[in-house]
Image (tube, grey):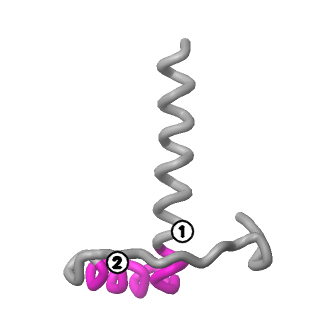
Amino acid sequence: MADKADKKAFALRIHADMLKALEEWAAEEFRSTNGQIEFLLAQALAHRKRTKKKEKE
């Protein structure tokens, strides 16, 4: 994962119900909401990368 100096802030518009669910999920996994979003995005990117490799084969 990137260092804090490598991170870029940006605004995220998200439905209130989705944000509440993410906050609860993050708390269950002892992460901040931001950390949970980064974790989920990293998983999605890794999955996409694996999927793209399979498509090329």
The location of residue 8, given as percent across then percent down, is 65, 73
Q: Which residue is mark 2?
A: 22
Image point 47% across, 51% down: which residue? 44
- For badge 1, the amino acid type reads Glu
Where does the magenta region start and end?
19-36
Image quadrant where one finds the N terminus:
bottom right
| 29 in magenta | yes
Image quadrant where one finds the C terminus:
top right
Front residue (pair 17, 27): 17
Q: Residue furthest left?
A: 17
Quadrant hosting residue 24: bottom left
Distance between the alpha carbons at the discs numbered 2 and 1: 11 Å
Give the secondary structure at mark 1. Answer: helix
Q: Which residue is mark 1?
A: 38
The location of residue 33, given as percent across then percent down, is 45, 83
Q: Residue furthest front?
A: 11
Image point 49% across, 42% down: which residue? 47
